[in-house]
Amino acid sequence: MQDNIIEVVGLSLPYSFQNFNISFERNKLIAITGPNNCGKTTLIKSIIGHIFTNNTIYIYSQELEYYRVTELNTIMKYIIPEEYLFFEESVLQELINSLNNLELPENIKQKKVKDIIKNLNMTKIQNMNPNELSDSNKIKLQLAKHLLQNPKILLLDDIFICMTKVERQNIIKLLRDIQNQMDLTIIMTTLNLEDCLKSDYIYVINDNIVALEGTPLEVLTKDNILNKIGLELPFIIDLSVKLRDYDLIEDVEIDMDIERMVNILWK
């Protein structure tokens, strides 16, 4: 338990969770998936304090209600589906001004902003009006603003829904790289199992309970359960599972691609 940064113990809410338990290990990229209306967003809103939970959520072993709002905002940042409103004329200035609450020398602020622009591949949009960005770039800007504050927990609720497959893959790769570089726990919800492939751990929620949990390999090979829930396996995983069941390959690999699959079958 000491490695868990968030503990949800006996969460019960009207028309939702009943005696629900879940925990999140620190310094991991964790995916929460499941069909619509399964409770993913309710869980995120409970963790960030938007839904009163009566002392059932613990952060660093302290009850959520124990934290002052300012203290919680330092520890935890979140992005939930909403209209993003930015106040500066450029992405660059929006990022610089997001550091105004930190007492840092100007040269340090400039360096932090320069680094985040480079790390999130935002060079091409840094001089654009943030309110004229695409939805995916608005999310990337919001993500950059949060990361500049060095939070310990980042919660992302269904941020991939407005993105193309390529945009989703790029953002998830960035999240994986950022999580590896920082002392950061990332918890993200998604409807798409393909978004979960690069995570450390997956929770599948259905009907307000945890239906499955484990590493991507442990969860995504439970094709019968996932199909009953209504979740579609990524093509290459689905194919791998079927080929394994027919003894045409020995093991399912999460990072399998078509070229490797062909090479294995050819041999």
Image (cartoon, helix red, strand yellow):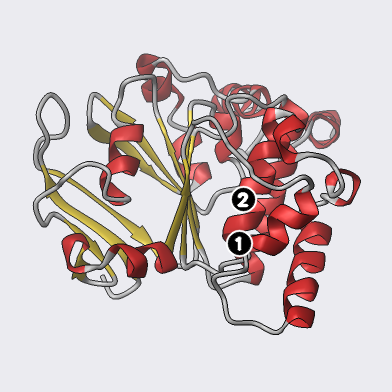
Tell me: 69 left or right of 147. Answer: left
Q: Quadrant of the N terminus?
A: bottom left
Q: Residue at x 12, y 24 (%)?
A: 15
Who is closer to the viewer here, 127 or 187? 127
Graded by Cα atoms within 10 Å as few (under 14), some (14 to 19) or many (20 or more), the crowding at tag 2 reads: many
Total marks placed:
2
Q: Identify the amino acid type marked 1.
A: Leu
For residue 2, what is the image quadrant? bottom left
Residue 83 in view of the camera? yes
Q: Identify the amino acid type marked 2.
A: Leu
For residue 239, what is the image quadrant? top right
Tell me: 74 left or right of 267. Answer: left
Who is closer to the viewer here, 101 or 266? 101
Residue closest to the far right: 124
Tell me: 134 left or right of 146. Answer: right
Q: Which mark is residue 143?
A: 2
Q: Residue at x 55, y 39 (%)?
A: 196
Q: Secondary structure at mark 1?
A: helix
For residue 23, what is the image quadrant? bottom left
Q: Quadrant of the C terminus?
A: top right
Residue 254 in view of the camera? no
**Residue 112 point in image, percent of width and height:** 74, 72
**Residue 101 point in image, percent of width and height:** 54, 70
Q: Which mark is residue 147?
A: 1
Q: From this view, report whether residue 94 is shown above or below residue 233.
A: below
Who is closer to the viewer here, 159 or 93? 93
Residues tagged 2 and 1 counted as in contact (Cβ below 8 A): yes
How far is disc 2 from disc 1 in space, using C-alphas? 6 Å
Q: Secondary structure at mark 2?
A: helix
Q: Residue at x 58, y 37 (%)?
A: 85
**Residue 30 point in image, percent of width and height:** 47, 50
